[in-house]
Image: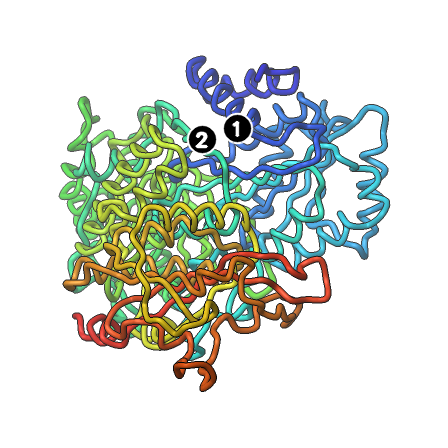
Amino acid sequence: MAAGPLTTALLADLGRKLSAEERETLLIETGQILSNCNPVDEIGSATGIVIGYVQSGKTMSFTTLTALAADHGYRMVIYLAGIKNNLLDQTTKRLKSDLQTEAENMKIFRVLQSPTMAEDSATLIKNTLSQRRKPVVLITVLKHYKHIGELTQIIKTPEVRDALGSQGVLIIDDEADQASLNTYARKNSKAEDWEEDEFSSTYSSILDLKAALKNHTYIQYTATPQGPLLINIMDLLSPKFHVLLTPGGGYTGGKTFFVDQPGLIVEIPRQEVYHYKLNDLEHCPQSLIEALQLFLIGVAIVVEIKQKARFLSMMVHADRETDASKKFHKWVKAILGSWADRLNDLDEGDPSRLELIAEFKSVYPEAVKLMDEPPAFDAVIEALLDVILDYRIHLVIGQGSKRSPEINWSSASAHILIGAEMLNRGYTVEGLAVSYMPRYTIGKANADTIQQRCRFFGYKRSYIQSCRVFLPEGTIEEYEDYVKHEEIMRGELSTKSLEEFEKVLVLSSSMNPTRNNILTKDIVRSKLLGWRQLNALQHIEENTRIVEEFRAAHEFTLFEDYKTSDRNHLMAKVPIDEAISFLRDFKISNVPDTLRKSSTIQYLNHMKEHTDLKYAYVFDMAYQVNQGRERSLIEKDGKLKINNIFSGASLSGSLVYPGDRYVYYPDFLCIQIHKIRLKHDSEWNRKILYTLGIYYPESLEHTFVGMP
């Protein structure tokens, strides 16, 4: 799509950051995204995924998309801007700055952060949409069901609904996998089924927002390489297109740190790896002292001597517990204060001063080992005398309802940020050079957790020689696996459609390095044991096609002759990979069953690799009942679900019928295909659809639990 005046102006402004080639790539990829969106003036919807690297410029992409959409007549853009207020503030500020909404474009864009009914935001939005100059409404909202629900209420008001009509709306979900199904997959509830109230209602609220808009496109921005999570998103929100973002030439991601230049990684000794219970350090670890020294030397060289940056920063991420952050903050503050005093207040010949200079000299070779022409150590120490007096330490932790104060990056040459979860995904650390992350993990972390801590990725090519990342041995190995997996995933996505990619994602062990750790023993014992039913009330035509194609591809035989069409069922013994493919293809659009389906696939893949599980049984229930067996549709907590798909036992007829739950083989995973004719006092009455019943055998549960 051609750039209009807003996009042209934005790209020109980005000329300070991007080369001409990078701006051209950005425009091409943004055009690909918008060209797949629902047309600006047609009722309908579309969903897509935009996949970038961590810290690679996703915000720049959706800001450019906003400008291009405005140039082509879209009237509203909604941003689901993270799960924390600081991320919401960060996104809003960035949009206002890049799109100059408070300068020359103030009459083109109207930015609203967290609009509410109480503030009469509906009237403000209606008036904006009704103006003859056709300004674009930009709405940033916290990714939380209450905030999204409040916005949905506003959208549903008659004044906004009438003013918006069928005009195009974009919903941009930043960090789409955050606050998602995966967050709740590990809940060890003892209930047999996943219930709606076990989940954040985030995705339900997104679906409600989508339903309130006549013409919209939902665009998920993510950098996650975690296979099961992408499967969850694909099932629930059914994306139809994807775009891979190309990072700029100055980008330094996982491949740079863990493949191309492994010398950037420093291993933290095992005894210095922090855990608030298992290893609550009493004294500042030596590795942190060395990290601080490397950082200050880097600032002296990059900022003071070579002047390649205005400032650099360091991040210390010790543990999720805020007390740990406070402990490390105390250590860092005391160390830097002592160094400043010794270097600048003591005489040049003072033994304490000379000892400190000797310590810096001992780490100097490590600091400059990747530099082609490093400055002399004496020049570095001379510059360091000023650096040690020009730093700021920031404790970045949650403080109840208070938001962390915004950092004034221009206030110092060196910034040291110490914090916990506030420094995770989405938080931008400007000029990050040294990262110190001594977090002790029990077991293997999953890919999305690893990704959250990738703040050290980004555009650092100009000072990459002074970057260092301090990590425990096990974490280094996890990052190496993560990077390998990320490159495989992007390679597959670059040549495959989403449908083709999803099949590879499910069946390829190389596509999910943490698959075996997704499920807990409690989940397998409580939720993946015995009979469970799915409620496939959406995608009726697509699921009908999927079932018919599966039937045609397999040879079914009669399970047992119970003499009546309602009780006679066909069965097929199928390879486990084909059972997995069938589950993958079958569409589910409610939160609990989407998670059940995804977890079943993960469970089967795990068992396939670690046991002799090679087959599953698929049953075509009551195959002669063309109109389906009648089942009631009931309402529970505002949600519709099929009351019970399984027929019970019966003593009537020529043979005793044991019931649908006995149509199975007890030592195999069994999938029943049920054709259902709904009974309900609504438009659902007499609708015919397919849904599934799944039997998880006790033998597999024991095998799973017994594994180390």
- Position of 78 relative to 337 (above/below): above
Q: Nearer the viewer, residue 207 or 623?
A: 623
Q: Residue at x 39, y 33 (%)?
A: 497
Question: Which quarter of the rendering shows the C terminus?
Answer: bottom left
Where disc 2 sits, the SS reads strand
Q: Secondary structure at mark 1?
A: helix
Relative to residue 405, is residue 275 drawn left or right? left
Which amino acid does the dot numbered 1 rest on?
A: Ile
Q: Counting residues from the N terminus, which is met first, the one under dot 1 or under dot 2?
A: 1
- x then y, percent, for residue 209: 66, 50
Q: Are marks 1 and 2 in contact (CB under 8 Å)?
A: yes
Amino acid beneath label 2:
Val
Per the image, the residue denoted by label 1 is 33
Measured from the top left, where is residue 296 in percent x and y?
30, 41
Camera sees residue 282: no
- Quarter of the image where one finds residue 378: top left
Residue 294 position within the rendered picture, expressed as x and y whole percent measured from the top left? 24, 42
Q: In this figure, what is the number of numbered marks? A: 2
Left/right placement of residue 565 relative to residue 456 reads: right
Q: Position of residue 161 (x, y in %)?
A: 80, 43
Q: Residue at x 60, y 20 (%)?
A: 7
Query: Which residue is at the front of the view, 493 or 278?
Result: 493
> Is residue 543 shown left or right of residue 555?
right
Q: Nearer the viewer, residue 650 or 56?
A: 650
Quarter of the image for residue 301 reads top left
Does 432 sit left or right of 358 as displayed? right
Position of 175 relative to 250 (above/below): below
Above-or-below relation of 81 to 146: above
Residue 373 shows up from this direction: yes
* Residue drawn at 85 percent across, 33 percent down: 130
Q: Which residue is mark 2?
A: 243
Q: Residues within 10 Å of mark 1 (few under 14, many from 20)?
A: many
